Amino acid sequence: EIPPLPWHRQWSPQMLMAGFLPFSAIYIELYYVFASVWGHQLYSLYGILLLVFLILIVVTSFITIALTYFQLSIEDYRWWWRSILNGGSTGLFIFGYCIYYFKFKARMSGFMQTAFFFGYMSTVCYGAFLVLGAVGFFSSLSFVRYIYRSIKCD
């Protein structure tokens, strides 16, 4: 039987924390990417974009591993889906940034531009959710296999 969890170890506060930390590593670069895609500005810092993407992958992996460890330490063995949700929750923060960018930065109006913007950005954010969820899941899976491989049962 799994003991009852305190409020800060429930899935929703963990998703907020796990999504906010990687998002805070990339939000400045998101402005430049959005300005180049939606604002018709040139983007020429592809090396920095690659570096920020690698930082995003590493931070997502470490945060998901830490939250999986905290979950396993309180005897909650249901880490599979929570690792996907924790890793992918950055996609939800990116969608929140899309709403902010559309409302305050973009000069778009009308139904077609709004539908076009949010249609494409919801697809991109869902893709980010899936990619980062897979990163979180596979990093947690390798962590769990590593820690349980060293246990000896007599």
Image (cartoon, rainbow, N blue to C red):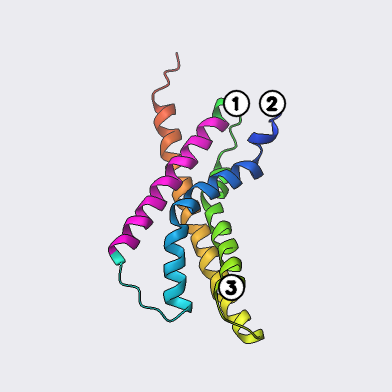
Question: In the image, residue 54 lies at what x, y percent?
Answer: 35, 53
Q: Could you tell me how far apart the alpha carbons at marks 3 and 1 are, in whole angstroms?
A: 42 Å
The residue at 48%/78% (across/down) is: 38
The residue at 44%/50% (across/down) is: 135
As drawn, the residue found furthest toward the top would be 154
The quarter of the displayed image where residue 149 is located: top left
Question: Nearer the N terminus, badge 3 or badge 2?
Answer: 2
- Report if residue 61 lies within the magenta region: yes
The residue at 49%/61% (across/down) is: 128
- Residue 148 versus residue 117 in the image, above or below: above
The quarter of the displayed image where residue 49 is located: bottom left
Q: Name the residue under label 1.
A: 74
- Residue 142 versus residue 148 in the image, above or below: below
SS for callout 1: loop
Question: In the image, residue 8 lies at what x, y percent?
Answer: 65, 35
- Residue 11 versus residue 150 in the image, above or below: below
- Report if residue 27 lies within the magenta region: no
Question: In the image, residue 84 lies at what x, y percent?
Answer: 54, 49
Residue contact at pointers 3 and 1, CB within 8 angstroms = no
Q: In this view, does 97 lie to the left or right of 111?
A: left
Q: Name the residue under label 2.
A: 3
Circle 2 Cα neighbour tier, 10 Å, few/some/many (<14 / 14–19 / ≥20): few
Q: Mark 3 points at which residue?
A: 102
Q: Could you tell me how far apart the alpha carbons at marks 1 and 2 are, in whole angstroms?
A: 8 Å
